[in-house]
Amino acid sequence: MDKNRVYIFDTTLRDGEQVPGCQLTTVEKIEVAKELEALGVDVIEAGFPISSPGDFQSVVEISKAVSEPVICALTRANTKDIDAAAEALRFAKRGRIHTGIGASDMHIKYKFNSTRDEILRRGVEAVKYARKFTDDVEFYAEDAGRADNEFLARMIEAVIAAGATVVNIPDTNGYCLPEQYGAKIKYLVDNVSNIDKAIISVHCHNDLGLATANSISGVINGARQVECTINGIGERAGNTSLEEVAMIMKTHHALGYTTGINSKRIYDISNLVSTMMRMPVQPNKAIVGRNAFAHSSGIHQDGILKHRENYEILDPEDLGINPNSIILTARSGRHALKHHLERLGYKIDKINLDEVYQRFLEMADKQKEISDHDLQMLMGDGQDKN
Ligand code: KIV
Ligand code: ZN
């Protein structure tokens, strides 16, 4: 096994779908799951079966419809939840039970009204019980971001000994700084004696806008699974965004990390999830936002047309995006105008261009953006066309 292969665990249909207003029908979830399979994710977290009959049924149907990725179902650390997950996963070619319990003193005291030892015991029991149904059991130590590292290491060592094959270290509240989160992962690598028997997974929330940075820091320090969602959707400010992680690994290939993601499918699945979940993507969102490749300043447009890499570190075609995304505005230069006119089939020489450019500026001053249709209007005076 390649030691730098990073597994992509998609939780769009579980953590992402928990967002109010984002709920999908089972049929819609199957469509997204098939697209996730085509995208090349390694694991699809399909739902939380005990939470509702609809979630249960979705896990059943996704297990039938999708065969490449592992299908994962979430549980709390109790037998009823685990029974429901095992039952929902019965058609999965490869099923994973994802069980866990709080790890921070805050959760232990105020959520469970319990003690560290009792919580650790419940975590271990849950893993042992889940192993009766599958040999692929992932354990999550909820709120690990705020947990005491020494206790967390003890808990992780115990659940691995009980049979956990993946250990998830969630920054549930999006609290950590990248250095802190990376140091936490390194602490586990250095202090959990049986850590080589499990894959460390990172699961970060974006409350401080650090979910992706924290996930990457986790990988640099030894994690080999990243839990993420399409467009970074998820509770509150969201989860780590899948497209950001995949493109960071691709762009910084010198780091040596690889994923199974086919980046050319990113833009389409981003649109599908955004439309289906009625969750618009912010225009300046990294990688998939409408403006992510839209250069509007004249200086940048000119630079881009001379050589794309002057102002772009990513190739839009790598994401399945049409590369003609230079937006024409009153700040665009002659070079950008000529590029678009030629793209539309108009032949333009220098003298002609000066004159057309003046008329273009008059038009652009009156409106925010100039569309292809506007350009055709501008040229609707019998110009020579190829
Ligand atoms: O954020 C979190 O801690 C979670 C767990 C249930 C994995 O989503
Ligand atoms: Zn989460």
Image (cartoon, rainbow, N blue to C red):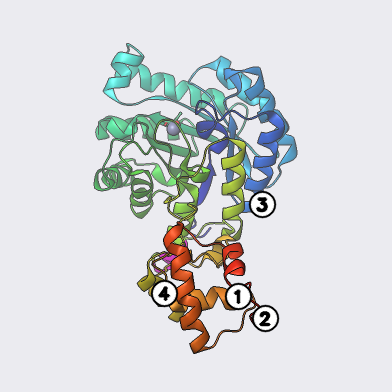
SS assignment at label 4? loop
**Circle number at residue 333:** 4
Name which quarter of the figure residue 251 lies in.
Answer: bottom left
In this view, the residue in front, 82 or 236, is 236
Answer with mark 2 or mark 1, whichever residue precedes in sequence: 1
Residue 295 located left or right of residue 181: right
Quickly name the residue at label 1: 343
Task: Report whether residue 246 is seen.
Answer: yes
Q: Three-letter amino acid code at disc 1?
A: Arg
Boundaries of the magenta span: 250-254
The correct choice, above or below, for 268 with respect to 336 in the image is above
Quickly name the residue at label 3: 38
Quickly name the residue at label 2: 385
Residue for point 60% across, 75% down: 343
The correct choice, above or below, for 175 with respect to 3 in the image is above
SS assignment at label 2? loop
Question: Which callout, 3 or 4, points to the residue nearer the camera?
Answer: 4
Answer with mark 2 or mark 4, whichever residue precedes in sequence: 4
How many numbered marks appear?
Answer: 4
Question: Which callout, 2 or 3, points to the residue nearer the camera?
Answer: 2
Q: Position of residue 256 (x, y in %)?
A: 43, 65
Task: Report whether residue 307 is seen.
Answer: no
Name which quarter of the figure residue 148 lies in.
Answer: top left
Q: Three-letter amino acid code at disc 4?
A: Gly
For the residues labelled 3 and 4, the Cα–Cα distance comes to 40 Å
The correct choice, above or below, for 348 with respect to 20 in the image is below
Give the crowd class for mark 3: few <14, some 14-19, many >=20 residues within 10 Å: some
Prevalent SS, magenta region: helix
Question: Which callout, 4 or 1, points to the residue nearer the camera?
Answer: 4
